[in-house]
Image (cartoon, helix red, strand yellow):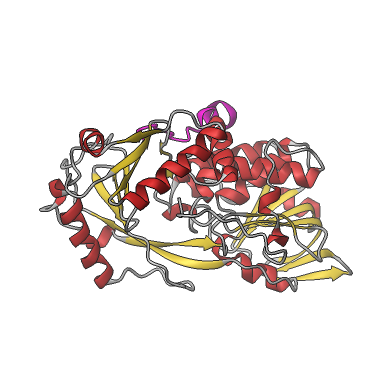
Amino acid sequence: MSRLENGSHAGESALSYMKNRASIAVIGGGVIGASVAYHLALNGMRDVVIVDASRGPGNGSTGRATGGFRAQFSTPVNVKLSLYSRERLIEFQRETGVSSGYDPVGYLWIAHSDRHLAALRSAQTVQIEHGLTEAIMLGADDVADLNPAVLREGITGGTFCQSDGYIRPLEILRGYLEAGRRLGVTERWGSSCLGFERDGGRIRAIRTSTGVIEVDNVVNAAGPWAARIAALGGLDLPVTPLRRQAAVTVPTDAIPANMPMTIFLDTGFHVRSREGRALLCWPTNEVAGDTLTVDEAWLATVDEMKQARIPSLAGVKLDREQCYAGLYEMSPDHHAIVGFAPGCENLFLVNGSSGHGVMHSPALGAVAADMICGNEPAIDVSTLRPTRFAEGEAINSGELL
């Protein structure tokens, strides 16, 4: 049993006295749902319940996240979400009693063409304008000096931000759940959402595999399964699960533990050190459903990339048993969807983070709770409104960063 599963049924006695009544039901107990629930309780909301189909915390996408954190984005809203989240991650232990594991070893983006270098420069202009002032441009020699493990040949330059780095997803989840429990948040694990009972434009109750819960408000924080939950309420939510695979090497000291997350912009291939091994990722655009298998052909390609781009890892073998896959929740413009659902006034959406959910969970949880409670959020997320696609105002991030 994991540390997170200890006490995972906390609050069941409270649920019994509530007689299946909740002011707010948060569907999805991953790090975003846990953050929303905690922040709702922090705002004074009572009878907040998390409903999740899995057997306990950490069994969904949060537990398979690679644990990167960055503010080097190419759109203002993502930069602002990162900067606000970073503040909260630094103070996370003081706030929740659990360390976020924030370790600012930096993110190194590497360009192999003038076009990609220009994209990095353009993104940095946005970053500086919106408060990220420590990111710097690098020449080809600077990149090689900063990370001697990479192959120097063909590099045209890059960017580096020392305040980017790593976090511990399961510990952040644990922190929000434990802090939420202290504020009265309850949890129902092993409870699948089966449907909604509506009264006009509002949800009156949710039907689950463990009973009916009457509600005042519902939050959809179901991650890759968000579209399925929305469909139960008659809503077409453009969120698609996308498989992301991760290759893990045998234990090695071929790269240092404090090596920055290193990303090659031309392919998206990236590498980091984690727990004495190298973690290698290469994003492929595939609609995944629920499959969590790892393809042998994909592993072979990643192994070739490893040898070509990180010569020090050339002779380090992959540990097939440690390789794994997880699911991203992708929106059409690769940005989160945040706001009340059109046509259902008490259903709040916080979905589609497109691989940035763990790192942005502090900001998204706080913003969602403020909006639900009628408060002014710390960050203007109007560009993330659910109606933007129908309005023809999807976010254009240029070269995706």
Q: Position of residue 231 (x, y in %)?
A: 69, 73
Q: Is residue 298 left or right of residue 347?
A: left
Q: Position of residue 302 (x, y in %)?
A: 24, 61
Front in this rendered view, residue 127 or 196: 127
Based on the displayed image, in which of its 4 quarters is residue 387 positioned?
bottom right
Q: Position of residue 379 (x, y in %)?
A: 67, 39
Front in this rendered view, residue 345 or 156: 156
Q: Which residue is at 51% across, 47% downward?
A: 358
Q: Is residue 201 left or right of residue 271?
A: right
Q: Position of residue 301 (x, y in %)?
A: 23, 66
Q: Is residue 193 left or right of residue 138?
A: right
Based on the displayed image, in which of its 4 quarters is residue 202 positioned?
bottom right
Front in this rendered view, residue 210 or 65: 65
Is residue 374 shown to the viewer in this render? yes
Q: How many marks?
A: 0
Is residue 72 shown to the viewer in this render? no
Which residue range is magenta in the image?
A: 89-107
Q: Which residue is at 36% across, 51% downward?
A: 116
User: Magenta segment: does it hold 332?
Assistant: no
Q: Residue furthest left?
A: 315
Q: Residue furthest right?
A: 200
